[in-house]
């Protein structure tokens, strides 16, 4: 490409952006809807993070391969000595390894944060569900319908669950 990035790079960037937008949309949906965020939902988010990592790694591998090929061509054409090409290739490899390491660290931190978030939400959901179930169980044991105040308390607990989920 004479100006800008190659079509291949543009496609990779668009794929990465699509995955990122998908994650953002999923998370915003749960904040707005109040639906219960499950471990399965969290796993879907992590799958998107994994896809994003794979996209970056594929690009690094592709460019790394092109770089090695370019050095070989420079040596073959006599523009660069083998020794200079080896040094440049080693430096380029150090840079690629650094980029890989940083990208992996970033990916791992996203996954760790998502797992922590999912665990907190799951714990919060369980706490609220346990309280709701205790109210229902008491009414069942007493062989009666829920009272108005119990229904109000259940509604309050469901609302608290939704609010706590959006804050985590």
Image (cartoon, rainbow, N blue to C red):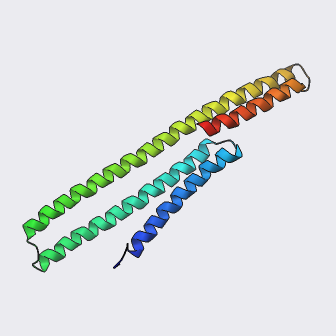
Q: Give the residue furthest to the right.
A: 144
Identify which residue is drawn at 64% across, 37% down. 165
Count of marks overlaid on the render = 0
Image quadrant in which you'd find residue 163: top right
Quarter occupied by the C terminus: top right
Left-right relation of 52 to 62: right
Quarter occupied by the N terminus: bottom left
Which x, y percent locates residue 154?
79, 29
Left-right relation of 117 to 151: left
Image position of 103 with respect to 34: above or below: below
Left-right relation of 7 to 36: left
Which x, y percent locates residue 82?
9, 69
Left-right relation of 50 to 118: left
Identify which residue is drawn at 54% across, 38% down. 117
Q: Nearer the viewer, residue 58 or 16?
A: 16
Q: Give the residue furthest to the front.
A: 3
Q: Nearer the viewer, residue 5 or 15?
A: 5
Identify which residue is drawn at 51% across, 40% down. 115
Q: Give the residue furthest to the top.
A: 142
Identify which residue is drawn at 33% across, 62% down. 60
Image position of 103 with respect to 127: above or below: below
Which x, y percent locates residue 143?
91, 22
Which x, y percent locates residue 15?
49, 64
Image position of 80 with respect to 106: above or below: below
């Amino acid at each position: 490409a004479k100006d800008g990035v190659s079509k291949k790079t543009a496609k990779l960037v668009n794929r990465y952006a699509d995955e990122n937008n998908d994650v953002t949309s999923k998370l915003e949906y749960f904040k707005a809807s109040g639906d219960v965020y499950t471990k399965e939902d969290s796993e879907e988010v992590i799958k998107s993070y994994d896809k994003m990592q794979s996209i970056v790694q594929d690009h690094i591998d592709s460019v790394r391969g092109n770089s090695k090929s370019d050095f070989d061509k420079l040596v073959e054409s006599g523009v660069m000595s083998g020794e200079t090409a080896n040094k440049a290739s080693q430096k380029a490899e150090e840079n690629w390894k650094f980029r890989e390491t940083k990208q992996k660290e970033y990916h791992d931190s996203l996954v760790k944060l998502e797992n922590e978030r999912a665990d907190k939400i799951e714990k919060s959901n369980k706490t609220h569900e346990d309280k709701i179930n205790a109210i229902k169980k008491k009414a069942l044991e007493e062989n009666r319908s829920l009272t108005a105040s119990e229904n109000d308390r259940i509604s309050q607990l469901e609302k608290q669950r939704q609010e706590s989920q959006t804050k985590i």
